[in-house]
Image: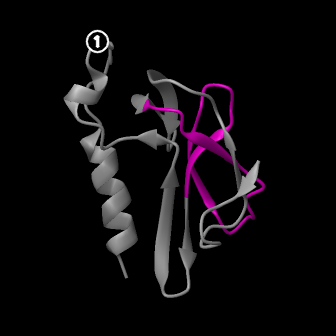
């Protein structure tokens, strides 16, 4: 268990495991399959942090918040993962670039 990064995100992270897989994730109430590669889960998040995605066991997989004059979006799964990362894996709903774009768009909004 550890504190997050450069203290730009409140709460902590815990290592979820090792390896890579396509996991069923609940992203803003939508069921999606996302590429995961040893990403952490988030915990002890204050109420000011918006929970965005959850792992199958209910642990927080992605969340977002403000920091100073900016924004931070943290994810243990990889919506930006290209096809080569998924080689040999079955992904029922395909690429998740729309979620990666959502993450980037949200952080760029004023």
- Magenta residues (range): 36-63
Q: Residue at x 61, y 25 (%)?
A: 56
Give the labeled residue for mark 1.
Answer: 88
Please check the rendered image and state whether residue 60 is part of the magenta-colored stretch, yes or no: yes
Question: Residue 102: percent from the left, percent from the top?
Answer: 33, 55
Front one among 54 and 83: 83
**Residue 78 picture quarter:** top left
Residue 8 location in percent, x, y? 59, 73
* Local SS, label 1: loop
Q: As drawn, which residue projects farthest toward the left?
A: 83
Q: Is 32 on the left or on the right of 29, as rendered?
A: left
In this rendered view, identify the residue nearer to me: 49 or 3: 3
Q: Is residue 53 magenta?
A: yes
Tell me the quarter of the picture where residue 82 sits: top left
62 vs 21, nearest the viewer: 21
Position of 44 compared to 101: left or right?
A: right
Quadrant location, the C terminus: bottom left
């Amino acid at each position: 268990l550890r504190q997050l990064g450069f203290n730009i995100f409140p709460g902590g992270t815990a290592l979820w495991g090792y390896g890579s897989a396509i996991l069923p994730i609940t992203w803003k109430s939508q069921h999606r399959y996302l590429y995961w590669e040893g990403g952490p889960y988030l915990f002890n998040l204050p109420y000011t942090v918006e929970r965005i995605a959850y792992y199958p066991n209910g642990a927080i997989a992605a969340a977002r918040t403000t920091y100073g004059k900016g924004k931070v979006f943290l994810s243990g799964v990889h919506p930006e993962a290209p096809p080569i990362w998924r080689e040999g894996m079955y992904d029922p709903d395909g690429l998740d670039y729309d979620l990666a774009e959502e993450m980037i768009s949200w952080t760029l909004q004023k």
